[in-house]
Image (spheres, helix red, strand yellow):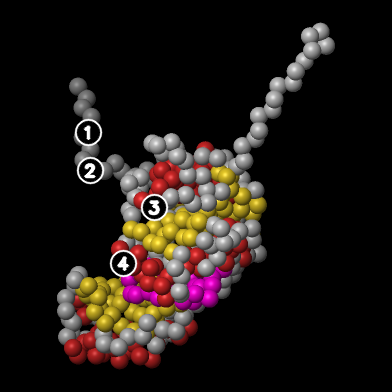
Amino acid sequence: MSRNKIQFGRPKKAKVKSDLIPININNLSIDGRGVAKIDGKTTFIEGAIPGEQLTVKINTRHKAYDEASIASIENPSTHRITPPCQHFEHCGGCQLQHIETNAQLDFKQQAVLNMLKRNAKVTPAEIIAPLKSAGLHYRRSARIGVNRLSQSQSAIVGFRRKNSSKLLQVTDCLVLPQQLDGLFDQLRETLDKIENAKAITHIEYLQGDNTGALTFRCMAALTSSSKALLEEMLQPFNLQGYLRYDHGLEPLTNHQPTLNFLVEQQVLSFEPGDFLQANAAINQQMVARAKQWLALNETDIVLDLFAGLGNFSIPVACEVKQLTGVEGSDKMVQRASANAKANQLDNCQFFKADLSQDIQHHSWSEQAYNKIIIDPPRSGATSLIKQLLETKDKGEVLRPTHILYIACDPSSLVRDTAQLDVLGYKMEKFSVMDMFPNTAHIESMALFVKAEKKAKKKPTKRLFGL
C-alpha cells in the first residue's frame, strides 16, 4: 500500500524559469511599476516605462500576476532620464526619478482615470490640468530613521531601503530643502558623540516659511550635555529642536520662535507633530483651486471635514457666511480655533469628532450646509458620506450642491466616487496633483455637483381614433 509523503512547513514556491522574455510596456500601475502581458498574464516590472520595449526575467510568480525585472532595454522611452539622486537604486523614497516629471503626472492621471472608469463606471465631465511643482527640494515634512551598525555601533541616519524595512545610510536627500544640505552628515556625527544616543529612535522634520524644527523621538531622557550638542548642531540649519517623550514634548531651549506658514494670505501656526501638506507649493495651488471650484460667495455655509489645523478652513472662511470644521484630534481643534482667532475670523467654529464612527449625535451634523470639503485619510470616507447624505431618521436630508473631495489614495477615491454617484452627485471636475514628485504616490482632487432631477414629462393626450 502506497502512502503519501507528509510535507511540513509552507508549500514550496514554484520554480521560476530564467528565460529572457521580450515585452512591450502598456501602462504604469498605481504603485509606479510598468505593466505588461506575458502569455495573457499581468506582469509588473519595476523601473519600466509605458511604451518601452524590454527584455525581462520573471522573478516571482503569483496566482493572479507575476513580477519581473529588466534584463535589457531595447527601445527606451523618450521620457526616461538619468535619476539625479545618488541613492536612487537603493532608497525606497523616490521610485520614479527615472521618468521625466511631466510624464509622471500624465501616467498617474491616466492610471486614476482608468480606475474610475473600470471600477466606479465614472468619467469626469471635465479633466483639469494637473497641479505641478518642482521635482526636487519640495518637501517640508519628513520622517528620518535612526539606527546603529551592529559591529561599529556608529549611527545610521536615513530612510528605508527599497523593498526592505532596513535603513539606508543617506548622505544627501534631494527632496528636502537645499538649506538642509549636509544635515544627515551632521546628525550622524552628533549622534556618535552624545550619551545614550540609542534612546533616539527617529527624527521628525517640519518646515515653516521662516524656520523649521527637528523633533527627536526619545525612549529615555537625554543628558544636558547631549541636548546642548543637538542644539548646537541645529543652529546652522535654522532649525528648532524638540525632544518627544511618552509624556509629551520638550523644547531644547526655552525661547522657540513660532512655527507658521502662509496660505492665501492667512498665517497658520503649527507645532511639532502636527500634520502639514508635504509640498508647500502644491498646497498653495490646491487651496486656490479648491476655492475656485467651489465658486464661494458670502452666502455659503461650508462644512470642512478632516479640517486639521485649518489649511482649507481659514482661507475659505474669509469668503463665506459661515464655516464649520470637524477634526478627530482635540489638539487640532484647538489649533484651528486659534488660527481662526489670529486671522480675526469670527464666522468659524470647530468641533472634535471621530469621523470613522456614527456622527448622528453631533450637533454640527444636524445643521444645513450647501458646500462640503472632504480631505480624508487613505482609508477614505465611504461611511461618512453615506451618513451625511442619506435620509435621516426624522426625514431630513442634507443636500449640499457642491462636494470637494481631496484624495490621497486612488482606491478610496474610486470607492467614494461610486458612493457619491449612487447618491446623485456627479464628478464635475478632476485633476491630479504633484504633491509627491518622483514617487508613486498619487494625490488628486475632484468636485462633485448634485445632479438636477429631470422633470417628468406629462403624458401626451391623444384623441380617440387619431
Give how far apart the Cα atoms at labels 4 and 1 are. 61 Å
**For the residue labelled by badge 2, is the local secondary structure a helix, a strand or a loop?**
loop
Indicate the quadrant where residue 310 lies. bottom left
> On the image, numbered disc 4 is attached to which residue?
331
The label nearer to you, 1 versus 3, is 3
Looking at the picture, tell me which residue is in the foreground, 214 or 381: 381
Give how far apart the Cα atoms at labels 2 and 1 are. 13 Å
Question: Residue at point 21% right, 27% down?
Answer: 3
Q: Which residues are the magenta region?
A: 262-285
Q: Earlier in the sequence, mark 1 or mark 3?
A: 1
Residue 5 badge: 1
Callout 3: few (<14), some (14-19), or many (20+) C-alpha neighbours within 10 Å? some
**For the residue labelled by badge 3, is the local secondary structure a helix, a strand or a loop?**
helix
Q: Earlier in the sequence, mark 2 or mark 4?
A: 2
Amino acid at circle 1: Lys
Callout 1: few (<14), some (14-19), or many (20+) C-alpha neighbours within 10 Å? few
The label nearer to you, 3 versus 2, is 3
Amino acid at circle 3: Trp
Q: Earlier in the sequence, mark 3 or mark 2?
A: 2
The label nearer to you, 2 versus 1, is 2
Q: Residue furthest top?
A: 465
> On the image, numbered disc 2 is attached to which residue?
9
Looking at the picture, tell me which residue is in the foreground, 19 or 324: 324
How many discs appear?
A: 4
Q: Position of residue 102 (x, y in %)?
A: 61, 65
Q: Looking at the picture, does residue 456 appear above or below residue 171?
A: above
Q: Position of residue 398 (x, y in %)?
A: 47, 44
Cβ–Cβ under 8 Å for marks 3 and 4 = no
Residue 364 badge: 3
Q: Position of residue 54 (x, y in %)?
A: 58, 56
In the image, taking residue 60 as reference, residue 132 lies left or right, namely: right
206 within the magenta span:
no
